Amino acid sequence: MRSIERLLMQYGESHQNKTNVIIHAIAVPSIYFVTIGLLWSLPVPYVIAQFDITWAHIIAVPVLYYYFMLSGPIGAAMTLLTILCFGAVNTLAHFNISVWLFSLVLFFVMWGLQFIGHHIEGKKPSFFDDLRFLLVGPAWWWVHWLKRMNISY
């Protein structure tokens, strides 16, 4: 069994309840977005800032590498999500909406929803056992879409 299949199977064990799955379908990509927003908001040294690079850009590189190591299609899908998230962050900034405040509030709301989902499910979040599952969640979310488009992962 491939590593991605094993990780998705383990992640899926605590995501069986339909309500929890729906909550995660909303919360997981939202948390990915706000994490990018929070990292984007952190100040960077001038030597980095002069190239218009943020911590979000720097951290996105190894994160996307991890996804591509798990699966090419998931890596491509996560690259698309990452680009969309950066676009949304830039849109917030363009309209003078505080990216860090917006992201921080949404971060707590979405994590609260996920914990409610796990309470309904009756199982603890997967990342309590293995922190890699913080990255597996978005891959799990994409697998549902990839399957619907008949794209094997």
Image (spheres, rainbow, N blue to C red):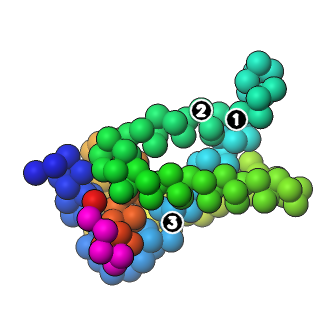
Q: Nearer the viewer, mark 3 or mark 2?
A: 2
In the orientation shown, which residue stands out farthest toward the top?
47
Q: CA distance from mark 3 to mark 2?
A: 24 Å
Question: Secondary structure under badge 2?
Answer: helix
- Seen in the picture, residue 151 relative to 19 is either above or below; the reply is above
In the orientation shown, which residue stands out farthest toward the left?
1
Specify which label sits upstream in the sequence, 3 or 2: 3
Asked whether residue 103 is in view, the answer is: no
Q: Position of residue 141 (x, y in %)?
A: 39, 65
Q: Which residue is mark 3?
A: 27
Instruction: Please tell me how crowded label 2 is: few (under 14), some (14-19), or many (20+) other residues with Cα within 10 Å.
Output: few
Q: Position of residue 1 (x, y in %)?
A: 10, 51
Q: Amino acid at mark 1?
A: Thr
Residue closest to the eye, 148 or 13: 148
Question: Secondary structure under badge 3?
Answer: helix
Q: Amino acid at mark 3?
A: Ala
Q: Quadrant of residue 46?
A: top right
Question: Secondary structure under badge 1?
Answer: loop
Residue closest to the eye, 62 or 12: 62
Identify which residue is drawn at 71% across, 33% down: 53
Quadrant position of the C terminus in the picture: bottom left
Look at the numbered discs 1 and 2 and tell me whether their residues touch, using CB distance below 8 Å: yes
Q: Which residue is mark 2?
A: 58
Instruction: Please tell me how crowded label 1 is: few (under 14), some (14-19), or many (20+) other residues with Cα within 10 Å.
Output: many
Asked whether residue 77 is in view, the answer is: yes
Residue closest to the eye, 78 or 100: 78
Q: Which residue is mark 1?
A: 54
Identify which residue is drawn at 66% across, 45% down: 38
Identify which residue is drawn at 32% across, 41% down: 69
Start-end of magenta stretch: 148-152
Q: Quadrant of residue 18?
A: bottom left
Q: Nearer the viewer, mark 3 or mark 1?
A: 1
